[in-house]
Amino acid sequence: MDDFIAARSQMALSLGFHIIYSCIGMVMPVFMAISHYKWIKTKDQVYKNITIAWSKGVAIFFATGAVSGTMLSFELGLLWPGFMKHAGPIFGMPFSLEGVAFFIEAIALGFFLYGWNKLNTWFHWATGVVVGISGIASGILVVSANSWMNSPSGFDFVNGKYLNIDPLKAMFNEAWFSESLHMTIAAFSATGFAVAGIHALMIYRNRNVRFHSKAFKIAIIFGAAAAILQPLSGDISAKGAAKRQPAKLAAMEAYFHTQTYAPLVIGGIPDTAAKKVNYGIEIPGLLSFLVHDNFKQEVNGLDKIPVKDQPPVAVTHYAFQIMVGFGVLMLFIGVLYFIALWWRKNWFTKPWFLKMFIWATPTGFIALEAGWTVTEVGRQPWIIQGVMRTSEAVTPMPGIQYSFYLFTFIYFTLSVFVIFLLKRQIQMVPELYDR
């Protein structure tokens, strides 16, 4: 395997695994704090049991997230020394603050896990809230660093040198808010559907129904609400990409030719040689409207981008279509849930309704992985948009393919252990959490 491809593959693999661990680690503490609050207010033992059960899951994903995140930080220096040499002093602030948030989260989680029947009730609950806030803050800070790669700011690039560095301006770059909003909502949507799907499976199997029904409700309310809000944040992100990264937008849409009344393409197979999309459904003018709020205005296509600066069109387009497709599916399911909650409560006992959530368990994370593929592949060939190419940042060290094989083994082994531990937690509900 070519060292450059191996380096990119290793980073993609690491990010692909870490994003799942980190999103669950961001969102599960919020669910935990909600169930804990409901126990304090209602004294219903089921909510306490749910809180304790979920806290064990939070601990598992905190540990795996810490391991995978630490590996990622080493990989940045190992695989991309050219990038870190120049970018480190500029966007190091959000990473440093993320470290602070991580330590606060670790301390608060320790208090929460071992504070049962030892701490004041409300102080104990507050430590769980701190875990949730710190986890979300960590995610936003990391995304801020990534958004800087898509929208570099806070420095002057003169004769190959990075001058007049402003870390605050770099951290709060033009893309940080839209990316952080989109990512945070995606984390709630993906985790909410995944957790709800597991509890729906237990309800469907008629196991500890009251326990799983209350847990299901907390998770899916957040997941469904996030899925309904996600298109709004997606629209903000897409408009930002059109402004700052026109090549990415064009690749997302497989949009080859600049034109007015720019059509939106749904599906299709891009043919980069013929510069067209086969079998796609075109909706005239809709891309112009989504980008400019105007059906007539011109949208720049790939023909305005030098070939050497164009991202891989097929991968970006397919990933974007997968993200949008699963996002729409989750939105539809979310709407059905709120219809059931307010007007059709008898649906909750219907097998088809529970099966819908069971099958939807992985959809959020599939959309999440596809979205990150769009973000990263769509920026290529740049590691810092318009400033540094990915090929200029990669390590000259040979044998990267062996590192890729090793890290692949580590991540898959780690995932097997996570699945085993989670399965064990679910199987132990009757004995430990709902007697």
Image (tube, rainbow, N blue to C red):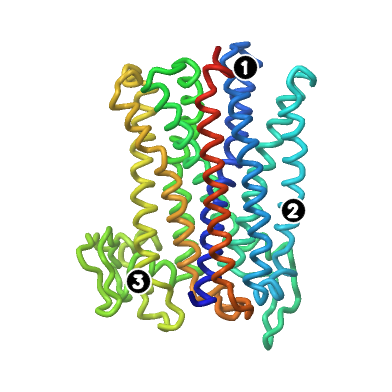
The quarter holding residue 154 reads bottom right
- The count of marks equals 3
Task: Identify the mark at residue 298; answer none if there is no mark.
Answer: 3
First reached walking from the N terminus: tag 1 or tag 3: 1
Q: Amino acid at mark 1?
A: Trp
Q: Which residue is mark 1?
A: 39
Proximity of marks 1 and 3: CB atoms separated by less than 8 Å = no
Q: What residue is drawn where x is 33% and y is 32%? A: 356
For residue 70, above or below residue 50: below
Answer with left or right where residue 214 lies relative to residue 47.
left
Q: Which residue is mark 2?
A: 97
The quarter holding residue 76 reads bottom right
Answer with left or right where residue 267 lies relative to residue 65.
left
Task: In the displayed orientation, state which residue is furthest to the bottom.
Answer: 159
What is the x, y in percent for residue 260? Answer: 30, 71
For residue 254, above or below residue 286: below
Asked whether 83 or 203 is in front, the reply is: 203
Question: Which label lies toward us, 2 or 3?
Answer: 2
Q: What residue is drawn where x is 75% and y is 26%? A: 114
Proximity of marks 2 and 1: CB atoms separated by less than 8 Å = no
Asked whether 306 or 105 is in front, the reply is: 105
The residues bearing labels 2 and 1 have C-alpha atoms spaced at a distance of: 33 Å
The residues bearing labels 1 and 3 have C-alpha atoms spaced at a distance of: 56 Å
Question: Which label lies toward us, 1 or 3?
Answer: 1
Answer with left or right where residue 98 lies relative to residue 258.
right
For residue 108, above or below residue 139: above
Q: Amino acid at mark 2?
A: Leu
